[in-house]
Each structure stands twice: as C-alpha cells, then as structure tokens.
Amino acid sequence: MMCWPLLVWGMFVFFREDREKFTFLFACSCLPVFLIFLVSRRGLPIYLDRQLILFAPFFYLFMVRGIGSIKGKVLKLGAVFLMGVFLTMALVNYYQGSIYCFNDRREDFYPGVHPRKSYKELMRRVFDEFRPGDKIITADRQARVLVSWSLRTNPEAPKQVPHVFVFSLKACSREEKDLSMASAEDANAINCGENDLCGFFYNFQGPREVRKEARKIEEKDFEMQRAWFISSSWDKNAFVPENVHFVEKVLEDKFKKTMSFGKDGFFVALYEKKNAAGR
C-alpha cells in the first residue's frame, strides 16, 4: 500500500522533469512484465512472478525518485521508514505467510488468503506404506508438483518410484490445458485424441525425477497391485478439476479403494487390485 503511491508519484515526477529517463525506466520495468504475461496467457505459460525480480531495480528507482521529491526531511525519513516496514512484512509473508489468490470467473472460488502449509507428514505416510511395485498417480498440476518435489527433497522417499500423470483432453478444461496439464504440443506428440486416456510417465531414481515417456495409457499400465492416487484442490469448497474425477472413475473400475486421508486440500487414496469376484 505504501509502495504504490510512491511508485506512481515517482513516475509522475520523472515524466514531468525528464521524459527520456521516464521512457527508459518505464520500458525496462513494465514492458518485459507485460510481454511475459501476454505470452503466458496466449501461448507457452512462462510467467513466474519471483523470476521477475530482475526488473525490480527499475521500480525501486521510480520509488526513490518519488521519495526524493518529497519536501521536508522528516517526511522523507518517514516515507523511507514506512517503505522499509512494508517491504519487510512482504518478505516475511512471502516466505512464511500466505498467498493471495483471486479468480472472478468461478463463483465458488474463495478470493482471499491461502496459508502456506507443510505437506511433509502427508507424503511421509505415503512413503512409509509404499511397497515395491506400487505406483503413484496424479491427475492435476498441483498434485504433480507436490509429488515431484517430495520425491526430490524428502530423504525418506523410496529409492525407485514410478509416477504417472494421467489425463484425458476431454476432461481437461481450457485453463488446465493452458497450464500445461495436457498441452497441445504433448498431446499431438503422442497422438492423443479427445477420448483417449494418456499419461506422462516419470521415474524417480535417487535425487532426480525424469520423464521417461509420454504416450497413451494401455491396459498393462494398470497391472500393478496397488496405486496411490494423489489429488488436490486450491478451492475453499474442495473443488477439484474434472480430470481428477475422470481418472478417479477409471481407477474405481479397476481397483478397490482401501484407504484415504488428506490434509488441507491434498487428498490421498490407496487403490488395491480387485480379486476375481470383483471385491
């Protein structure tokens, strides 16, 4: 709240006193951010706010110019002090606090603060009960990231873990495709049709998880005795993507759910192979 008035005021002062410097700083600060955002919305999603710190000095120069134009030493020191306080609070919030998340296009989305929480205990339970031959299946982007990160950073993770991200283009929304859940490029590469069930196959070995292949799901891919299905919701009302429901139905046709647990928007279900009687 404190930085925006100083930023706007600094832009105004630069524009009034030296338009050449204003044009240079504005181009270096705003144009790259706008172009990256535009490309992310229209093409390849490359927008990641923390990687835009490279352009932060140009914004700070605007704010410094705004502070420098304030008359009175006391007011200047007061502005510097308040800006330091707000920046410190923002850094604490960024690393330990909450994420502000808004989506006006969906009514059931909660526009507010989502606390950052640790899911180490959740994944540790999966790893403790993981058996050789088990497979981890995900169907939404957030769960896929959690599994990949946990496998790379948790020393208690099994040494070899097959992880499959399963998707159906028919079940993926346009927004999910834009987020590279099932990008058109990957779908075309594996000749995945709207009604096909496809997957990205990962294999975790040591400290790395690498994608081995991308192809259509075959019947042999469900020959394991147990499958850990991990899904997530970023919504207050536990809304999950349609692709998750689709994959869950596929698993329920072939396996029996024997265990389920979760924590704050992440859900884990253990599916075991049905016997000959279908039980």
Image (tube, rainbow, N blue to C red):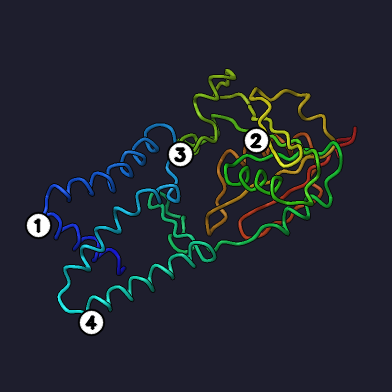
Decide if residue 273 is in sight here.
Answer: no
Residue 125 spot, x, y in % from top left: 78, 55
Instruction: Give the image quarter of residue 100.
Output: bottom left
Kindly report which numbered mark, 4 or 3, lies closer to the viewer in this rendering.
4
Image quadrant for the N terminus? bottom left
Question: Mark 1: few, some, or many residues within 10 Å (few <14, many ≥20)?
Answer: few
Quarter containing the C terminus: top right
Q: Nearer the viewer, residue 148 or 166?
A: 148
Q: What distance separates the C-alpha of mark 2 from that of mark 4?
A: 58 Å
Depth check: 132 or 8 in front? 8
Residue pointed to by mark 1: 17
Residue visible at 41% across and 55% down in the picture: 102
Tell me the SS state at disc 2. Answer: strand
Q: Is residue 166 above or below residue 13?
A: above
Mark 1: amino acid? Glu
Q: Give the label on residue 175, or none.
A: 3
- Residue at mark 4 to residue at mark 1: CA–CA distance: 24 Å
Mark 4 or 3, nearer chain start:
4
Earlier sequence position, callout 4 versus callout 1 = 1
Q: Within the image, what quadrant is residue 13 found in?
A: bottom left
**Closer to the eye: label 2 or 3:** 2
Residue farthest to the bottom, as pictured: 74
Q: Name the residue under label 4.
A: 74
Amino acid type, residue under disc 4 in the picture: Val
Which labelled disc corresponds to residue 165? 2
**Gap between marks 3 and 1 measured at Cα:** 44 Å
